Structures are given as structure tokens and as C-alpha cells.
């Protein structure tokens, strides 16, 4: 993919290069084993480049040369509050529609108590429809807000270019270990939260905001495809537009790589309301934002978000159909064996290392990397002579990744796969 840049419009002073790295010459690389040398230096390169990106981009020269875009920290907080408000608007729209339906059919109750009771029953019997309307309104509001905030060129700023098929396959296999790690964060956080809630009773009101419990209830009376549409597709689009698209763009440009990702991911966790759930999704948010940075494709974090939520609703559906076997699989109170956790962390660490080494760059005719003057995922100006380049990793990464994933599956089978769970999964797959 290429674009054009007017040479006369380039600044006389080189633009800061937040993701630049020095590469060995062909002569040097021919004198040593490429994979062994690359494997030895990869971790050092990753840490050095990340720290360089985080510390160097906010220099006085950069601030004077290019003013980074927003949102800033205060506006990002307002966006976070806006997410909650948008969901509330979706709920109001559903309730208004329900009242209009009652009025049109002359079924309006004659007392406030009966109306309250009917609404309570409605939230239980039509929970998926309620969630669907809420999510649809949320996505529409977010799309309009992002378009207004970014203005002209919103699609190029989000960067909707496709990513490599191999990257998509790698992200697909990351979902299971990532979900298990998030589950461990949830288990630990929920244990601490429960201890506090026992001492401070009003904190127990947050337990009514348990998203996973709502998903389990909806799974009992809804089809899997409807659940995936409402709980996986809509949040993947709406929440990614807000956090990776809008908030993340400004915070990475102003705060740098590491602080920007961390702050955005914490905000992403906070909108999930329940403290334990918020802590559990922060690692997921960090991974999704990292994927966005290395692929420079908005579709990459959307895919990870979709796959993670689809995995959750699939487990919930499995639990509803085979509770005697599958419930253990969705029990957040059961600790994951340390060997499984270690295998998952090891695999995801090497995945991140591989993604960083093969990250996408925009290269100018002089060989330097194009940036708008700050850390960004946006596309170059239309018509500029700039090429998109994806570095090739050493060949040893591929068998290494395959081995580590198989090792993770082996640990999962040896230390985490109860025979009843295995039987339940097989029954579910046959029914599906």
C-alpha cells in the first residue's frame, strides 16, 4: 500500500521517529546465525525501543514542532462517562418503545406498582432484546461522536487497512490463554472485593452489575448467534471506537506508548462497572491496544475483542445446555493451575515479541519512517510516496510459537481438563 508525499512540504528538520530501529547490514548478518542472534537480542530490542518511544516523544522539540491531537486526559475522562451515558440512552429508548407498545394495545397497567412489576418481568423475559437495543443505540451514538470529533479523514485516522492473515490466525489462538489469564485476574480481584463487601454492605450493590451473570441468564433462552451479535459484535465495534480509536489516539500522542496504553486500558476497565470485572479486562485492553499499535489496523483490536466476547458467550451457552458437565468450565471461583498460567504467560509474551518485531511501518523514499510528528496509527497523507512495510521475523519464531501453544494446550489438558468438562464440551460441539 502506497501513498504520496510532496518532498517540498517535508520539514528541514527530521521528524521524530518513535518506532525506529537500527538494522544489521547483510554482511554482518551473514557472519552469524540469523535466528540465534535475533533470539538473543529480541527481548533487549523490545524493551529498549519501547522505553525510547515512551520517553523521547514528549521532548520540547517535538511539542514545539507538532501539537499532538486530543483527546487529552480530561476529555478522555469525559468520553468514558459518555460511554455510560450512551448505554443509559439505549435503555431509555427501549423502555419508551415498550410503553408506546402498551399504549397502542391498550394494555397500560392502572397503577405504578403494576408498571414496575411488568418492567421487572420484561427485563427477565426479554433480556436479550433489551441488551440488543441498548447496544445498537450505543454503537450509533459512538459512531456519530467519533465522526464529529475526528472530522474530515476519520477513516484514515482510525486506519481501516487490513492486516496480515498470519497475524489474524495468531490473534485467534491467543484468545484462549488471554481469557484464562483475565479469568485469574477476576478470581483474585473478586476474592478481595468480596472480603471488603462483607465489611461494607453497601458495596454489595455492585454485584448487581455483574456482566457475566447477565450473560449466563440470557444464554438460557437465547440462540448462540443472537448472543454473539449482541454481546460480541456490537461491543467490539462500539468500545473499540471509543477506547482504541478516540481515547487511545490522543493519550498515545500526548503521553507516549506505555503510559498511553496503560491509562486507556484502565479507563476501558472502569466502564465495566464492577471492580472485579474492571480489573479482569485491563490485561485484555492492554493486549488489544498493543495489537493496534503493531498492526496499524483498527480491525485487529476489533477482532480480538470480538473473539474474546464470543468465547465468553459460547461458554455461557454451553453451561446453560449442559450444566451438569460444563458449569465447572465457567466457574470463576476455581483457580487455574500455576502450570497453565505460566504456559499462557510464556506464549503471550513470545507472541507480543513476535508482533513487535514484525510491526507495520510506513517508510519514506529516503528510508526513514513516516510519522505525523507523534506516536500514531493513522495512515499517511493521500498521494504521498510512502510504502507500508512489515518486517519479517526470523524463521525460528514460527516453530517456537507453535511449540509454546501446543505446550499451553498440553498443560490445559493435564492440569485443567476435568473429564466431565471434556464430555460436556464434546456434547456441546456435536449439538452445535
Image: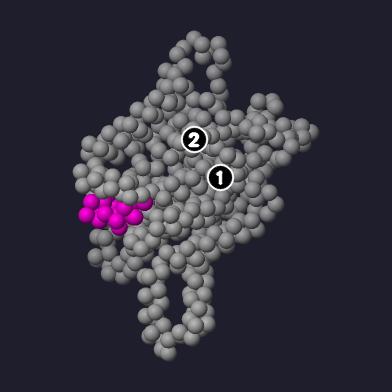
Q: Residue at x 54, y 44 (%)?
A: 299
Local secondary structure at mark 1? loop
Residue bearing the label numbered 2: 167
State the extent of the magenta-drawn residues as a range: 314-330
**How many C-alpha atoms fall within 10 Å of the one at disc 2: few (<14), some, or many (≥20)?**
some
Residue 327 shown in magenta? yes
Q: Is residue 79 above or below residue 166?
A: below
Q: Whole-percent x and y of residue 128?
A: 42, 64
Q: Answer whether labels 1 and 2 touch (C-beta < 8 Å).
A: no
Mark 1 and mark 2 lie on one chain; the one further toward the N terminus is 2
Q: Main secondary structure of the magenta part?
A: helix
Which residue in the rendered view is the most extreme toward the left? 419
Query: Can you give x and y, in whole percent of width and height, for residue 78 in the image?
Result: 54, 61
Find disc 1 in the rendering and name its residue: 298
Q: Is residue 361 shown left or right of residue 349?
A: right
Residue 154 in view here: yes
> Horizontally, is 203 left or right of 98 in the view?
left
Q: Residue at x 26, y 48 (%)?
A: 424
Image coordinates for residue 372, horizontal then vertical, percent:
66, 40
Amino acid at each position: 500500500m502506497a501513498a504520496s508525499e510532496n518532498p517540498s512540504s517535508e520539514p528541514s528538520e527530521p521528524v521524530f521517529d518513535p518506532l525506529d530501529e537500527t538494522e544489521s547490514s547483510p554482511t554482518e548478518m551473514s557472519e552469524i546465525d540469523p535466528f540465534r542472534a535475533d533470539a538473543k537480542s529480541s527481548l533487549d530490542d523490545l524493551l529498549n525501543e519501547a522505553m525510547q518511544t515512551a520517553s523521547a516523544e514528549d521532548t520540547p522539540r517535538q511539542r514545539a514542532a507538532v501539537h499532538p491531537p486530543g483527546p487529552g486526559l480530561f476529555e478522555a475522562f469525559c468520553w468514558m462517562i459518555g460511554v455510560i451515558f450512551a448505554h443509559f440512552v439505549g435503555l431509555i429508548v427501549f423502555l419508551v418503545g415498550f410503553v408506546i407498545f402498551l399504549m397502542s394495545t391498550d394494555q397500560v397497567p392502572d397503577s405504578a406498582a403494576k408498571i414496575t412489576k411488568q418492567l421487572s418481568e420484561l427485563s427477565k423475559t426479554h433480556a436479550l432484546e433489551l441488551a440488543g437495543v441498548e447496544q445498537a443505540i450505543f454503537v450509533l451514538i459512538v459512531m456519530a461522536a467519533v465522526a464529529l470529533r475526528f472530522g474530515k479523514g476519520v477513516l484514515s485516522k482510525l486506519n481501516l487497512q487490513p492486516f496480515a492473515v498470519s497475524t489474524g490466525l495468531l490473534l485467534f489462538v491467543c484468545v484462549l490463554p488471554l481469557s484464562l489469564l483475565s479469568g485469574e485476574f477476576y478470581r483474585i480481584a473478586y476474592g478481595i472485593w468480596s472480603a471488603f463487601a462483607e465489611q461494607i454492605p453497601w458495596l454489595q450493590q455492585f454485584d448487581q452489575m455483574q456482566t457475566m451473570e447477565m450473560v449466563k441468564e440470557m444464554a438460557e433462552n437465547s440462540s448462540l448467534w443472537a448472543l454473539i451479535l449482541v454481546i460480541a459484535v456490537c461491543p467490539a465495534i462500539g468500545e473499540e471506537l471509543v477506547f482504541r480509536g478516540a481515547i487511545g489516539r490522543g493519550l498515545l500522542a500526548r503521553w507516549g506508548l506505555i503510559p498511553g496504553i496503560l491509562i486507556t486500558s484502565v479507563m476501558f476497565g472502569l466502564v465495566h462497572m464492577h471492580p472485579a470485572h474492571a480489573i479482569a479486562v485491563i490485561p485484555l485492553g492492554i493486549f488489544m491496544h498493543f495489537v493496534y499499535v503493531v498492526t496499524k489496523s483498527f480491525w485487529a483490536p476489533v477482532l480480538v475483542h470480538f473473539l474474546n466476547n464470543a468465547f465468553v458467550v459460547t461458554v455461557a451457552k454451553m453451561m446453560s445446555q449442559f450444566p451438569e458437565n460444563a458449569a465447572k468450565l465457567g466457574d470463576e471461583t476455581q483457580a487455574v493451575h500455576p502450570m497453565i498460567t505460566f504456559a499462557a504467560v510464556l506464549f503471550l509474551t513470545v507472541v507480543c515479541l513476535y508482533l513487535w518485531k514484525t510491526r507495520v511501518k510506513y517508510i519514506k523514499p529516503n528510508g526513514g519512517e513516516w510519522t505525523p510528528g507523534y506516536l500514531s496509527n493513522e495512515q499517511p497523507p493521500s498521494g504521498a510516496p510512502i510504502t507500508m512495510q512489515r518486517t519479517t521475523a526470523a524463521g525460528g519464531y514460527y516453530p517456537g510459537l507453535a511449540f509454546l501453544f501446543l505446550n499451553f494446550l498440553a498443560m490445559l489438558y493435564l492440569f485443567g481438563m476435568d473429564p466431565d468438562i471434556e464430555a460436556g464440551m464434546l456434547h456441546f460441539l456435536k449439538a452445535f
